[in-house]
Image (spheres, helix red, strand yellow):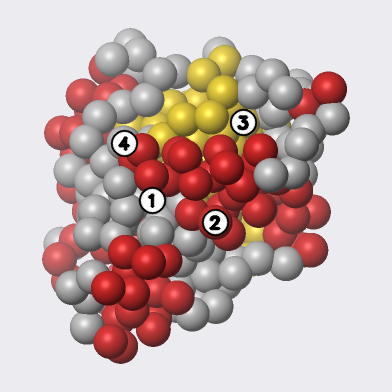
Amino acid sequence: MKMMSIASGSSGNCTFIGTDSTNILVDVGITKKRIQDGLRSIEIDFTDINGILITHEHIDHIRAIGVISRAYGIPIYATEDTCVEITKCKTLGDFDIGLLKPIEPDNEFTIGDINIIPHSIWHDAVDPVCYSLFNDGKKISVATDIGNYDDYLVDCLKDSDAILIESNHDLRMLQVGPYPYELKRRVMSDRGHLSNEASGRLIRSLLNNHLKAIFLGHLSKENNYPELAYETVKVELNDNPFTDDVKDFNLQVASRDCCSELVLV
């Protein structure tokens, strides 16, 4: 399996996951051109995409649904309530709502040779999910927009070979930053976003001897910066020493502006 973050941040999100025969996008919250440029960098075109997985209905995850659907007719998978909300979003323009394929949390489905399981998450959307994708004994997970996590989510994400996980904000920057009080409360709530420290604790619980790559994603532009997210998570991990068999993984920050490297697992 292969994975690349095309963009990740509070302004827009899109992740590519594929095999030799199946190609999937998780969220399309940036422009069609940026997604196309990212795909072309790994010699993939929109005509090669077999499905789009949507985590929830916020615009930084669905921005390009309309234009991509009108141009390419790619099936779009989301929970039923999320599908309803997508159809209400006027900024997407008209598109064939028959392309929307309702899914249910914890119910496995298949696109090509990739098996997919959506997992319920804590966020202020109608029915948000994260995803784990499986092929040939490998597992890649994408989990952002998480206000909180519990044993259920840890169990869902464990044993991943690669993972993109939220590291949205530095708590101190958020508290003293420019956001209005109510928005600060929302971000810090159980249905908001995961802080750098909380991300580090969650990652610590997911370490295993075959985890190859960890992307820190969905960073806030106003309340975080890449070096701070990286160092905070790294400190959290170093405060809890690993066993010898879980030291060999690549920790990196997914950029809002450019693609990551293509990771193979």
Q: CA separation, marks 2 and 1?
A: 14 Å
Asked which quadrant contains residue 207, the reply is top right
Residue 178 pos. (x, y %)? 18, 73
Between 224 and 214, the one lying in front of the other is 224
Camera-side mark, 4 or 3: 4
Nearest to viewer (mark 2 / mark 4): 2
- Circle 3 packing at 10 Å, graded few (<14), some (14-19), many (20+), is many
Give the residue at mark 4: 255
Residue at (79% x, 63% y) in the render: 151
**Residue to which mark 3 is pinned:** 162
Quarter of the figure with residue 148: bottom right
The alpha-carbon separation of the residues under discs 2 and 3 comes to: 20 Å
Is there a contact, CB below 8 Å, between mark 4 and mark 3? no
Label 2 sits on a secondary structure element that is helix
Q: Which residue is mark 2?
A: 197
Q: Earlier in the sequence, mark 2 or mark 4?
A: 2
Q: Nearer the viewer, residue 206 or 231?
A: 231
What residue type is disc 3 on? Ala
Choose the circle earlier in sequence order: 4 or 1.
Answer: 1
The mark that comes first in sequence, 3 or 1, is 3
The residue type indicated by label 4 comes to Ser
Residue at image mark 1: 218
Quarter of the figure that contains the C terminus: top right
Q: CA distance from mark 3 to mark 1?
A: 16 Å
